Amino acid sequence: MDEKEIPKNLERDDEEYVSLISSLPSDIDFVGRELFKYQESWYGNKMLQAIINFQRGFEPQDTDIIIASFPKAGTTWLKALTVALLERSKHSSDAHPLRLDNPHNLVPFFELDLYAKSSKPDMTNFSSTPRVFATHVPLHTLQEALKNSSCKIVYVWRNVKDVLVSYWYFKSALMKVEAERSLLESMFESFCRGVSYGGPFWEHVLSYWRGSLEESQNVLFLKYEDLKTEPRVQLKRLAEFLDCPFTVEEEENGSVEEILELCSLRNLKNLEINKIGITSRGVDHKNFFRKGEVGDSKNYLTPEMEKRIDMITEDKFGGSGLKL
Ligand SMILES: Nc1ncnc2c1ncn2[C@@H]1O[C@H](COP(=O)(O)OS(=O)(=O)O)[C@@H](OP(=O)(O)O)[C@H]1O
């Protein structure tokens, strides 16, 4: 069977699913988990089922907004900024959704949350527009589910070395262990080979980069490091792309700064809900907030590791026009 072909009425125990999965290349990731290569990216069994559920069952609306990213590239921040932009002026500051819940509960992932168990999830929480969703899958896999609708996709990417180190800390926190060097080293190997959830990283970024060049009306390409160095400029870009630009009055009233402050790492991290809460998938909210520094990977990667990853990056991004 063509690995891109999706069988109808597919459930995890179905023969068709078993047949699909057995036709896919497989490999082992940094924790010894079997991953399958589907549409050029790697996923575990459950995730793959969820992606197929999503591709089959999602009914897009042209007003939908989708936040896309490689894991640990700035997803939580972008979810928060998007919610804050869309919700501005609707709430008193205490009752703001971001003060009451974690961005991941406000903006669910297709493959991790909504379609994890079914191709027809309960969408009653999404009765108003625009609906905002998230995903870690690359653009071509996402587009298959969007079925030519004109949803707006916002992608955030980040230096791969900081992504790797952030992933290492996150994974260690999930496993409730100290961040051990041995795990970093095996994650590094998996990353370089491209065998990790949604990987290879470089092809993931390139899929959205090319999409943003071809369909700039529909795909906005943001960089974590730019959000850090010029937050005002990037927030205004996001607002314009989402068709909710700041008015002159809003700019004069400090609305831009208010949103940036609300969504700052320091503010979100210190909210009670993010200190004690837990997502519906069982992840402690606090694990989504760490240092948020650019270049933190320097403190953990050896010069050899940096050199190897830089060479891969140069090789993969060469000629794409994409700059680190
Ligand atoms: N508001 C805000 N501002 C700036 N940076 C932030 C913010 N929220 C989270 N972070 C940092 O982003 C890293 C987590 O990445 P993701 O949010 O993509 O993780 S996830 O994929 O959703 O699990 C992780 O980066 P590291 O600190 O380098 O590990 C978080 O600290």
Image (cartoon, grey):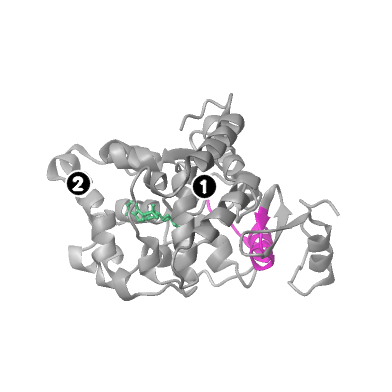
Q: Residues within 10 Å of mark 2 (few under 14, many from 20)?
A: some
55 lies left or right of 279: right
When the figure is inspected, residue 228 is found, relative to residue 122, above or below; the finding is above
Image quadrant containing the N terminus:
bottom right
Give the percent coordinates (x, y) of residue 198.
60, 52
- The amino acid on which the numbered mark 1 sits, given as a three-letter code, is Cys
User: Quadrant of residue 20 in the image?
Assistant: bottom right
Q: Does residue 250 show up?
A: yes
SS category of the residue bearing label 1? loop
Whole-percent x, y for residue 10 in the image: 76, 68
x and y percentages locating residue 73 in the rendered image? 45, 49
The range drawn in magenta is 42-62
Predominant SS along the magenta part = helix
| Residue at 61 percent of width and 54 percent of height | 196
Q: Residue at x 34, y 56 (%)?
A: 80
- Distance from disc 2 to disc 1, alpha carbons, whole Å, reads 27 Å
Placement of 110 over or under 283, stated as above or below: above
Which residue matches tag 2?
257
- Which circle marks residue 151 in the picture? 1
Tell me if mark 1 has few (under 14), some (14-19) or many (20+) residues whose alpha carbon lies within 10 angstroms of its own. many
Image label count: 2
Residue 57 lies in quadrant: bottom right
In the rendered structure, does residue 46 fall within the stretch colored magenta?
A: yes
User: Type of residue at label 2?
Assistant: Glu
At a point 58% along the width and 62% down the height, the residue shown is 111
| Tag 2–tag 1 contact (CB < 8 Å) | no
